[in-house]
Image (tube, grey):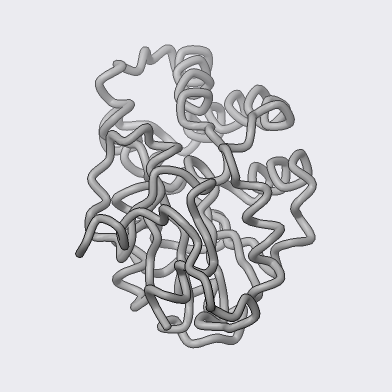
Amino acid sequence: MPAGLRRFAATVPGLSAGARVFNAILWDMDGTIVDTERVVWTVMQRAFLEAVKIELPEALFESLLGQSELDFYRHMVQRYALTAADVAAIREAFDRDYIPMLADVPALPGAVEKVVEFHGRAPQALVTGSTSAQAGAVLEALSIRERFAHVVACDQYSKGKPDPEPFMLAASRLGVDPSSCLVLEDSPSGVTAAKRAGMKVVGIHEGNKGKYDIRHADLEIASLRDLDWGLVLSRFA
């Protein structure tokens, strides 16, 4: 694919701003709307140390990025032979510190503006690996809760990204065909999940700082500031 199409560089004159290519727009949250990855890891390390006296090695950080919280805990149960009581104690310590911090986590450049703009293009849903409480805290802090018709969080599905279940659930709740959905994602697992659901995907590098290989997205952009609806139309119309 030509580089000019893979990076939304400019507007395309002559396209109707009201034209609709997609019946729904599905947003990832962590790494796409807000930059939470390092904060999550720092708080999680502290929660493990406090609750079960386990020091998580830094090497785990990169390997677990993009997982839902549900899948993260499943991985940790297997790795450290954690009990249900252990997981409950870790969750309690994590949520106690993490959820209040979300009020101050910054939005990534262009994220709030594009959520507001695209709300006028098609119904939107948030599809996140975070919990409902965490997602709600972010949306309230950024004053964009009303821009999403639905929030699909990890406590509402059984298999997280890269499984397509979260995106399929969002399409079902919106009452649209999965093939008519546009997905905005930053992680390889998220892109894979959306593609497996039969959706078109824009991969965004701002939140992942260019370190992820998301070439399997239909389009790649450096930042949401580069995302122009005219170019979405020119690519997919």
User: Taking 204 as reference, is 135 left or right?
Assistant: right
Location of the C terminus by quadrant is bottom left
User: Taking 134 as reference, is 209 left or right?
Assistant: left
Q: Is residue 103 above or below residue 15?
A: above
Residue found 64% across the figure and 61% down from its top? 151
Residue found 48% across the figure and 18% down from its top? 42
Instruction: Name the quadrant containing residue 147.
Output: bottom right
Q: Is residue 34 above or below residue 135?
A: above
Residue found 67% across the figure and 50% down from its top? 113
Q: Nearer the viewer, residue 59 or 12?
A: 12
Question: Where's residue 102, x and y in %?
Answer: 67, 31
Location of the N terminus by quadrant is bottom left
Question: Where's residue 43, x and y in %?
Answer: 53, 21
Q: Is residue 233 above or below residue 57?
A: below
Q: Nearer the viewer, residue 41 or 103?
A: 103
Instruction: Name the quadrant containing residue 27.
Output: bottom right
Residue found 35% across the figure and 18% down from its top? 56
Q: Nearer the viewer, residue 32 or 118?
A: 118
Q: Nearer the viewer, residue 185 or 8?
A: 8
